[in-house]
Image (cartoon, helix red, strand yellow):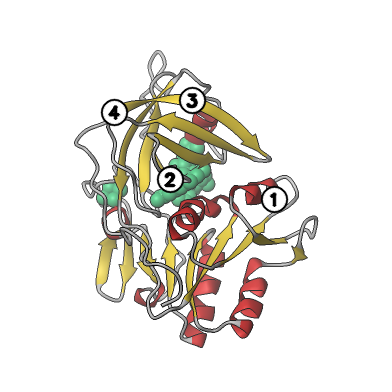
């Protein structure tokens, strides 16, 4: 085994019953992304890869004659030890993320979580290799925190210079950008192949857009390297009630909010989940 054992290697941390309020303590901009911090005193510390269903306490759809939005799913970006803070990384891509990204210190979030199953620590002395794309870097930041001080490698890919500042949220990352503005000009999967050539005894942990996850699934399968993929699918409830998040696996359909969002890559024929990705 390399490095110390990791405490609490993923199993599910149970969410307290019901939705609770959490006060926003900071809204920090990192290029195209916002890090929203809040205090969640009654909540347990989440495992890396778990997620929360978030809503703003005020201004969450509705209006005169409209319906309120459903809560939206967010990976926990960071849950600093010895604190009751939770951090979330948000990219404003629509009405829900847009509203959350504008919340300021003092305002309230409504949250349910932590939900789902997260990452499991590497076995057999394999070196953790964290691979993130775009907003998918979120669950990898808390996983890097929880794996420390174990030696690991981090590879991150972004569209352009506007998104690349997200890389500062993890440490010692190698970068790739689609437009070549920062780091390697090309795909993060090219960095992954080079890394696996140099160090094949690895355990891959990945989160990002479906096409990136599918490429990582195929590369890992070809090289017989184990990979855990944090997937996304449309989630209306987050706790198993709506069946909106089902994905096909080798053991049949599973609800991603309960069995995932992290799944072993070898359970998937494809990491392209219908209806996911932006
Ligand atoms: C487990 C999980 C973790 C997530 N973590 C994060 C995170 O850390 N940060 C973050 O910014 N976003 C995250 N997302 C995605 C986020 O939930 C969606 O972007 C959000 O629900 C969009 O809501 P909206 O009202 O802003 O936009 P909408 O108008 O609802 O959607 C905008 C665009 O995003 C697509 N989209 C919506 N929901 C999803 C989804 N669940 N998966 C993939 N594409 C979607 C839509 O097809 C559309 O193209 C996560 C999703 C899941 C399931
Ligand atoms: S989101 Fe409702 S069952 Fe998974």
Residue at the disc numbered 4: 20
Which numbered marker is on residue 76? 2
Q: Position of residue 98 (x, y in %)?
A: 54, 31
**Of helix, strand and loop, which one carries label 4?**
strand
Above/below status of 118 relative to 82: below
Q: Position of residue 195 (x, y in %)?
A: 62, 77
Above/below status of 40 relative to 161: above
- Marks 1 and 4, Cα distance to the nearest angstrom? 33 Å
The response on whether ligand 1 sits within 8 Å of label 2 is yes
**Which comes before the other along the chain, label 2 or label 3?**
3
**Considering depth in this image, is 72 or 152 the residue closer to the camera?**
152
**Is disc 4 surrounded by few (<14), some (14 to 19) or many (20+) residues within 10 Å?**
some
**Is disc 2 surrounded by few (<14), some (14 to 19) or many (20+) residues within 10 Å?**
many
Which numbered marker is on residue 164? 1
**Of helix, strand and loop, which one carries label 1?**
helix
**Considering depth in this image, is 198 or 49 the residue closer to the camera?**
198
- Marks 2 and 3, Cα distance to the nearest angstrom? 16 Å
Q: Are marks 2 and 4 in contact (CB under 8 Å)?
A: no
């Amino acid at each position: 085994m390399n490095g110390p054992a990791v405490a609490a290697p993923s199993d599910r941390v149970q969410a307290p019953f019901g939705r609770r309020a959490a006060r926003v303590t900071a809204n920090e901009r990192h290029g195209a992304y916002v890090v929203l911090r809040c205090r969640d005193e009654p909540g347990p510390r989440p495992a890396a890869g778990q997620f929360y269903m978030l809503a703003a306490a005020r201004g969450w759809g509705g209006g005169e004659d409209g319906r309120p939005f459903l809560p939206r799913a967010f990976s926990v970006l960071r849950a600093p030890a010895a604190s009751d803070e939770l951090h979330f990384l948000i990219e404003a891509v629509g009405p829900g993320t847009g509203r959350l990204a504008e919340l300021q210190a003092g305002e309230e979030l409504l949250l349910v979580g932590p939900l789902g199953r997260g990452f499991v620590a590497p076995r057999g002395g394999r070196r953790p290799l964290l691979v993130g794309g775009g907003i998918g870097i979120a669950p990898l930041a808390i996983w890097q925190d929880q794996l420390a001080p174990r030696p690991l490698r981090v590879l991150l890919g972004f569209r352009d210079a506007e998104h690349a500042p997200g890389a500062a949220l993890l440490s010692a990352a190698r970068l790739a950008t689609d437009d070549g503005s920062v780091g390697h000009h090309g795909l993060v999967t090219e960095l992954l192949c080079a890394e696996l050539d140099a160090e094949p005894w690895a355990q891959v942990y990945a989160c990002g857009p479906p096409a990136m996850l599918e490429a990582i699934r195929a590369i890992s399968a070809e090289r017989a390297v184990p990979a855990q993929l944090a997937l996304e699918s449309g989630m209306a409830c987050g706790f198993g009630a709506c069946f909106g998040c089902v994905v096909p696996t080798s053991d049949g359909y599973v609800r991603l909010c309960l069995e995932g969002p992290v799944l072993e890559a070898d359970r998937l024929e494809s990491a392209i989940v219908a209806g996911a990705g932006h």
